[in-house]
Amino acid sequence: MNVGIEIGGTKLQVATGDPSTGKIEQIFRYRVDKARGANGILAQIEQTLQALPYPPGRIGIGFGGPVNCTTGVIATSHQIGGWSGFELVQWFKDRFEASVLMDNDANVAALAEAHFGAGKGYKQVFYITLGSGVGGGLVCNGALYHGNAPGEAEVGLLQLDREGNSLESFCSGWALDAKIRALLPSLPTESPLKQLVGTQQSGEAQFLLPALTQGDPNAAELLQEYADTLAWGLSHVVHLFNPQIIVLGGGVSLIGEALRVRVQEALPKYLVKAFQPGPLVALAELKEETVLVGALCLLRCI
């Protein structure tokens, strides 16, 4: 049995599926309890795998943070305690008679979109995840690009000024939430965005698209500013790697076509003339299953 696992800062997903087709057969989804740290996540994984009708023969893992994919050791997690220096691959091998491979979650997501999603048919695919953090992955001719351990393609860590503000500082989900939260007091009572958010103090970005649909000019201006900053960050990716396609994934990408079009239109102005108009910008097609499919894709190497 082939198993793909996504270990994130807010969610844990375990799935069985077919690495050759990317088809998911069964999914188990859990919310991560940060207070329980790494041990709580490991206990949930072990319980889930032990309850499967057949023991796993191959396990692929997409981990939310920098990892050493050669040694199977976690460098760190920026959201959950207890992971730094943890030998995750060995932990699985000690408990299950299975072959195990692990990589960063954005890397495996890039692999999934390149083989079975929006990047299928392209030679160079860059994937960016816009979620609680901002991460990236690069696939060339069907294979992941790896730098020196413990990571590579960390587009979210690109510093956009000398004060240390990064692309993640501006374009992560929590950054967009904070931007909306700061804007709300200045909006008129009849503003759709203000009415939709109400008294909510987190996850405000989820109301951006509904407000936009209702014709809220403040939502449109905020999204334009966000897309422009994202395009600025992605221009560095283009100048370094010049991929054929950039795939937008993660929770913020669920804003959909309204975001994609704005990024596609803004990107050329940040590119040198020789690189214009730049790569195609697309939305991830595999959505919540992207990392799981990518984790299964890793197993094609075993």
Image (tube, helix red, strand yellow):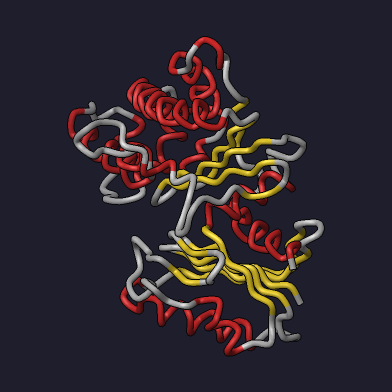
In the image, what residue occupies the spot 62% across and 25% down? 280
Q: Position of residue 134 (x, y in %)?
A: 42, 46
Q: Is residue 216 above or below residue 276?
A: below
> Left or right: 180 with respect to 117?
left
Quadrant where the N terminus is found in the figure: bottom right
Q: Is residue 5 above or below residue 164?
A: below
* In the image, farthest residue toward the right: 20
> Left or right: 178 with respect to 74?
left
Quadrant where the C terminus is found in the figure: bottom right
Q: Is residue 290 above or below residue 236?
A: below
Residue 131 visible (yes or no): yes
In the image, what residue occupies the spot 32% across and 72% down? 81
* In the image, farthest residue toward the front: 148
Q: Quadrant of residue 177?
A: top left
In the image, what residue occupies the spot 75% across and 57% down? 22
> Left or right: 209 with respect to 159?
right
Q: How many marks?
A: 0
Q: Position of residue 196 (x, y in %)?
A: 36, 39
Q: Is residue 281 above or below residue 101?
A: above
Q: Position of residue 244 (x, y in %)?
A: 65, 29
Q: Position of residue 60 (x, y in %)?
A: 64, 68
Q: Quadrant of residue 214?
A: top left
Residue 251 visible (yes or no): no
In the image, what residue occupies the spot 59% across and 89% down? 95
